Image: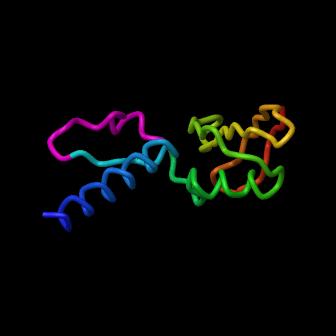
Amino acid sequence: MKHLRAITLRLALALSLAWTLGLPVPFAGLPSAMPAAEAQPAARFSPAQAAALVQKQVGGKVLKVDTFERGGRVIYRVKILQQDGRIRTLNVDGQSGKVLKQQ
């Protein structure tokens, strides 16, 4: 019973982390959150990779990663809490991994 409980907890944590990072989380029997006609173009970088890239560049703690489309490209908006207490937002191109905009 303890083994099953540990597996369930790990699965719940993994799904929570994936959802927090904006990764697609499949749920059997539930309709997709995004209709196929509105599906975003494929990206070479994942939200987690974009977050790691930004964190490496500016340091601090990643607060949130949002995914959106601009001009037919996937863009990740990464919000990060810097060590000095300021919140900074950087946009990362999902294809190239290039930081597009710093705020």
Residue 87 is situated, as x and y percent measured from the top left of the image, at: 77, 32
- Residue drawn at the location 77% of the way across and 53% of the way down: 98
- Residue drawn at the location 39% of the way across and 55% of the way down: 14
In the rendered view, tell whether residue 98 sits above or below residue 79: below
Q: Main secondary structure of the magenta part?
A: loop
Residue 94 is situated, as x and y percent measured from the top left of the image, at: 63, 51
Specify the segment rendered in magenta: 28-40
- Give the quarter of the figure containing the N terminus: bottom left
Q: Residue furthest bottom?
A: 3
Q: Residue furthest front?
A: 2
Residue 98: within the magenta? no
- Give the quarter of the figure containing the C terminus: top right
In the rendered view, tell whether residue 103 sits above or below residue 55: above
Residue closest to the eye, 10 or 91: 10
- Residue drawn at the location 87% of the way across and 38% of the way down: 84
* Horizontal side of residue 79 vs 27, given as left or right: right
The quadrant where residue 45 appears: bottom right
The quadrant where residue 44 appears: bottom right
Labels in figure, total: 0
Residue 34 is situated, as x and y percent measured from the top left of the image, at: 36, 34
Residue 22 is situated, as x and y percent measured from the top left of the image, at: 49, 43
- Residue drawn at the location 46% of the way across and 49% of the way down: 17
